[in-house]
Amino acid sequence: MLRYQDIVLQSTNMTAGPISGHPLCAFTVDVEDWYQSSVDFDAPITERVVRNTERILAILDRRNVKGTFFVQGRVAETFPKLLQRLVVEGHEIQSHGYSHRPVNKMDRKELKVEMELARKTVEDACGVQVTAYRAPDFTIDRENIWALEVLIETGFKVDSSIFPMRTHRYGISGYPTVPHQVQLPSGASILEVPVAIWSSGKIRLPVAGGGYFRLIPGFILERFFASMMTRQPVIIYCHPYEFNPHDGDEYYRMNVSKAFLFTQGLGRTFYGKKIDSLFRRLPFGRFDQVLETWRIK
């Protein structure tokens, strides 16, 4: 079994700097249905995921920005036309797993089936090749770093699953915050591209998405990203339901605690306006375009 101490982290060459005029910040969306991904993995995928994704597309279209959608396989199965629309409109599509079950709760056999389904369902839905992956809730960590071997075995070339600081839920303390190659003992490697973590000395602050992103004022996020994008790609992430402060109905709410609903709803009211403002002020684009900007392969 691959252990964390067995891998080698190799820096990518960013000394040449970014290509002028190209996007420096990647806008990425983990496409999932909130209740199914957060409460009941076996619940049906609902029309809400389509309606909420359309809210994002309206902002992207208004600002002429293209994004990358890491799509859950069950969403792709249920709403293939959504993925086809994303392709037609020029957005990038990659994988967010199949069932949204945490990677660190699976054994190797289960994960291989999950990854094969994740790729097949998305590729079948929209006809594009899937090469990049982001795990549900960043659930690749020190204890299951072997998951990277399974990603390589199932055809993935890029991963964006390792959170480069330790939180109470996920992450690896002291992990590199910039893109790098992870070299395995077998000689195989995969490009790891972490989401944005602002750092100063020993201080690290998760600013790429989630509750921090929702609660930090937009002008402060803009300063964080502007300072970071001079030296590395800035990868931010969001979810369709964060653009809808009233997501869900009473049937689903009966099965969720008020405390959980409260934390999940924090910062949603002005989320769309915050994203719109960042699009107006900073150079955003697709995940693959930003890696190209920095000559990262």
Image (cartoon, grey):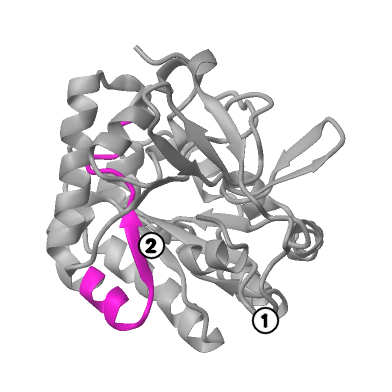
Asked whether 214 falls inside the magenta stretch, the response is: no
Q: Range of the magenta residues?
A: 83-102
- In the picture of the structure, the residue carrying the numbered disc 1 is 21
- On screen, residue 251 above or below 39: below
User: Dot 2: within a 10 Å radius of its alpha carbon, few (fewer than 14), some, or many (20 or more) residues?
Assistant: many
Seen at 48% across and 60% down, the residue is 28
Say left or right for 199 vs 266: right
For this orientation, the residue located farthest to the right is 201
Say which residue label 2 marks: 69
Secondary structure found at label 1: loop
Relative horizontal placement of residue 112, taking residue 197 as reference (left or right):
left
Q: Residue 267 location, x and y as percent?
A: 61, 55
Give left or right: position of 112 versus 293.
left
Q: Amino acid at mark 2?
A: Phe
* Image quarter in which the N terminus is found: top left
* Residue 171 image offset from top left, x and y in percent: 56, 28
Cα separation between marks 1 and 2: 23 Å
The circle on residue 162 is none
Q: Residue at x 76, y 56 (%)?
A: 231
* Residue 286 point in image, percent of width and height: 49, 69
Classify mark 2: helix, strand or loop: strand
Callout 1 amino acid: Gly
Crowding near pointer 1: few (<14 within 10 Å), some, many (20+)?
few
Pair 1/2: label in front: 1
